[in-house]
Amino acid sequence: MRSILVLAAVGIGVMVLASLLSGRRAAVMGAAAVTAGVAVSLAAVLLIDCRQCHTASLAVGGFVSVPFFLAGWLILIVVGHGPEALPWRVLASAAAVLQLGWAATAARAAFDGRCPCDGLPWIDTVGGLASIGIDRWVMAFFALAALVSLYLLGRRTRRA
């Protein structure tokens, strides 16, 4: 329960910050929602306790980040971007590239049957833990979410 509250607070905090800084412009909100989804994903990974093999925050992070990603993608498709959204587009694109980097390596480790922590570049090898259940799919979801976000941000950037 605590991890749900922490992850939701991270995402909502990013959205409130974007709203305050942008004056609630819809063009900014799409990129901000994608950034919030990436922030929730990263926070979920940082909450993993590999020493005790507690990876439940991955599943929670996957479920909590979905509304942020979906809202951001919908806004990017429908509303598009104005010139005022450029700093948020750059931030969202950079965050999605970073997410793709760590999520792809962790997903590869999980699909090989190893613990997803084994694929994270900032965690030393955990040794011998296996990936089971939803752990195999959450990292792949994070990588796919980063790809979709990059596509939509890039598509709208070319049109702007």
Image (tube, helix red, strand yellow):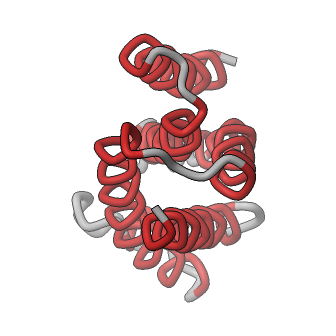
Left of 115 or right of it: where is 65? right
Q: In the picture shown, does residue 144 fall above or below 1?
A: below
Q: Is residue 8 something one can see in this rendering?
A: yes
The x and y percentages for residue 83 are 38, 45
Residue in the picture at 30% in, 58% down: 94
The x and y percentages for residue 2 are 61, 16
Residue in the picture at 37% in, 37% down: 84
Number of numbered discs present? 0
Residue in the picture at 47% in, 45% down: 82
Quadrant of the drawing holding the N terminus: top right
Viewer-side residue, 94 vs 5: 94
Q: Is residue 116 something one can see in this rendering?
A: no
Viewer-side residue, 78 vs 5: 78
Residue most toward the bottom?
112
| Image quadrant where residue 134 sits | bottom right
The x and y percentages for residue 49 are 43, 41
Left of 67 or right of it: where is 17? left
Q: In the picture shown, does residue 53 fall above or below 67?
A: below
The x and y percentages for residue 37 are 56, 43
| Image quadrant where residue 106 sits | bottom left
Residue in the picture at 56% in, 76% down: 110
Viewer-side residue, 40 vs 35: 35
Viewer-side residue, 16 vs 160: 160
Left of 118 or right of it: where is 36? right
